[in-house]
Amino acid sequence: MKKIEVVAAVLKYKDKYFCAQRKNKGPLAMKWEFPGGKIEKGETKEDALIRELKEELLLDITIDNFIMTIEHQYETFHLTMHAYLCHGDTNDIKLMEHLNSKWLDKNNLKNLDWAEADIPIVKKLIGE
Ligand SMILES: Nc1nc2c([nH]c(=O)n2[C@H]2C[C@H](O)[C@@H](COP(=O)(O)OP(=O)(O)OP(=O)(O)O)O2)c(=O)[nH]1
């Protein structure tokens, strides 16, 4: 079984969280997620997160806190995902790889169709 290790950024501004929708391809097509991606050889998790946010959103971020690590078995691969609370140095975000995005407060996070692996993160943010 293929294994991948990913970092994800929960970007927070005031009371809102940044949510991004994946493109219309692949097994997680159209699902909502937190921006990030795979850790490359020789990178720390923090390096990977900073690089991915720059690539995906043209955004420089500061990492504030570790949130949690998720282990999730999808049908075709095993995912290990490390999530961090972060903030951007601007609110001018450009979607380079996602279809859509929203800033939602915690009361509205549950309304999105999240990638399955993200549900524990969403629950933690909501306070469940
Ligand atoms: N970045 C991110 N990926 C997530 C989340 N939830 C979740 O299941 N994933 C999965 C989707 C992908 O299979 C993988 C992240 O890989 P990725 O976005 O860097 O790469 P990808 O497979 O879409 O494509 P590629 O760049 O390898 O071609 O983790 C999430 O909240 N953020």
Image (spheres, rainbow, N blue to C red):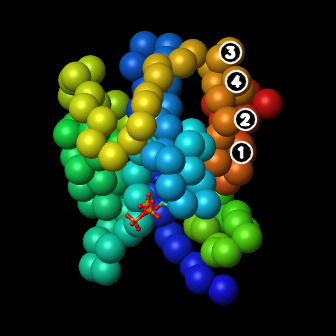
Q: In what element is the residue under mark 2?
A: helix
Q: Is residue 112 above or below residue 56?
A: above
Image marks 2 and 1: residues in contact by CB distance under 8 Å: yes
Q: Nearer the viewer, residue 65 or 78?
A: 78
Question: Which is in the foreground here, disc 2 or disc 4?
Answer: 4
The single residue placed furthest to the right in the displayed view is 128
Where does label 3 land, which residue? 107
Using the numbered discs, state the Cα–Cα distance from disc 4 to disc 1 in whole angstroms. 14 Å
Using the numbered discs, state the Cα–Cα distance from disc 4 to disc 3 in whole angstroms. 9 Å
Q: What residue is rendered at 52% in x and 74% in y?
A: 4
Image marks 4 and 1: residues in contact by CB distance under 8 Å: no
Where does label 2 land, which residue? 123
Type of amino acid under label 1: Pro
- Where is residue 126 shown, x and y percent of the image? 69, 26
Question: Which is in the foreground here, disc 4 or disc 3?
Answer: 4
Q: What residue is rendered at 61% in x and 60% in y?
A: 27
The dot on residue 111 is 4
Q: Which of 125 and 37 is in front in this view?
A: 37
- Quadrant housing residue 18: top left
Where does label 1 land, which residue? 120
* 4 or 1: tag closer to the N-terminus: 4
The single residue placed furthest to the bottom in the displayed view is 1
